[in-house]
Image (cartoon, helix red, strand yellow):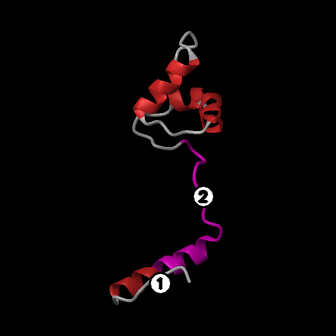
Amino acid sequence: MPSSRMPKSMVKKKENERGWKGSKAQVRYWWKQRTAIKAASALRSRLTGAGAKPRISEIEDILFDQVLFRRSANEKVSRD
């Protein structure tokens, strides 16, 4: 985070120059999670527990197999 001694207008200008597009809520969330983020490996892109989990693993497996089968047969696969 930028130094608290910098004027807000200067901080805003630096953020715009760097192309940062993040919400204040996201920054607050990261700030609360800072110890876990620092402790994690540099090669990890997510903390544990992040991301959506499959609801029913059996259906996920069947759906995955069906998508692979249709793609191998050059059929269109859509969400409909």
- SS at mark 2? loop
Let me know if residue 1 appears in the view.
Answer: no
On the image, numbered disc 1 is attached to which residue?
A: 66
Residue drawn at the location 57% of the way across and 31% of the way down: 36
- SS at mark 1? helix
Does residue 77 sit above or below 7 in this rendering? Answer: below
**Residue type at numbered disc 1:** Gln
Point out the residue furthest to the front here. Answer: 9
Determine if the magenta segment contains residue 50.
yes
Does residue 46 sit above or below 75 in this rendering? Answer: above
Which quarter of the picture shows residue 47? Answer: top right
Residue drawn at the location 45% of the way across and 83% of the way down: 77
- Distance, label 1 to label 2, CA atoms, is 21 Å
Q: Residue 52 has which mark?
A: 2
**Residue type at numbered disc 2:** Ala
Determine if the magenta segment contains residue 14.
no
Picture coordinates of residue 35 (x, y %)? 58, 26
Q: Could you classify mark 1 by the number of other residues whose Cα lies within 10 Å: few (under 14), some (14-19), or many (20 or more)?
A: few
Picture coordinates of residue 55 (x, y %)? 65, 67
Point out the image quarter for the C terminus. bottom right
Nearest to the observer: residue 37 or residue 24? 24
Mark found first going from the N terminus, 1 or 2:
2
Residue drawn at the location 41% of the way across and 86% of the way down: 76
Residue drawn at the location 45% of the way across and 81% of the way down: 67
Nearest to the observer: residue 30 or residue 20? 20
Picture coordinates of residue 1 (x, y %)? 53, 22
Magenta-tinted stretch: 47-66
Point out the residue furthest to the top here. Answer: 5
